[in-house]
Image: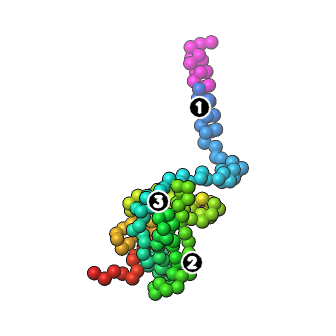
Amino acid sequence: MGLKYRILIPAIILATGLMLLTVVGCTSTSPSDLAQKAATPLPSPSPKVITAADLAKLRWIEGSWRGTGDGQAPFYERYKFENDSTLVVEGLADETLSKVNDVSRFELKDGHFGSGTADSGSVATALDDSSIQFAPLGKGNFFRFQRESNDSWKAILNWTDKTGAAKERIYHMVRWPPRTP
């Protein structure tokens, strides 16, 4: 066998191996693999360990608020601490703030602050002087309350739609009625 063939044969073997690796590596995932990935549950949120003293950082949210955003009609809510470990949120009928339509509770239990049930609840995953972030325990949105000033804050909701696209909605909350200077 001549020198030409001793060089050419290993080169052909190497090139063939590289082509096979490229073809195998670039093949798409099968539909059954995609279905299995879609059925795999998301990891559980990592709740932040919170104390009643930590919740004092959230006292800025107390009061009555008018919410607007995303083409929705204004809505009204009242946030108040019932005690050092329970935040009550009242959905109000209108700007008079006189009729409560809905009540939800965020409670501190076993070092975790959240609301709802395991299937549709949420738990705090971060807390500092100007914000608190929540993750869903089951179905639901990720959301954050972000302080802007003494008289305004944002509620920022994040979720994934049916097609897997990331979505976000921001509500602007202002103290209601507005304070007079």
Q: Which of 48 and 55 is in front in this view?
A: 55
Which residue in the protein does label 1 denote?
18
Disc 2 versus disc 1: distance between alpha carbons? 64 Å
Please tell me whether residue 151 belongs to the stretch shown in magenta.
no
Image location (x, y in percent) of residue 148: 36, 68
Q: Earlier in the sequence, mark 2 or mark 1?
A: 1
Name the amino acid, label 3: Ala
Residue 38 pos. (x, y %): 66, 54
- Residue 127, percent from left and from top: 44, 58
In the picture of the structure, the residue carrying the numbered disc 2 is: 102
Residue 90, position in %: x, y?
Answer: 52, 76
Q: Which residue lies furthest to the top in this view?
A: 1
Q: Can you say whether 17 is above or below 78 in the image? A: above
Could you say whether the residue bearing mark 1 is in a helix, strand or loop?
helix
Residues in magenta? Answer: 1-13
Residue at x 48%, y 77% (from the top left corner): 77
Comparing 29 with 115, the one in front is 115
Task: Return the residue at label 3.
Answer: 52
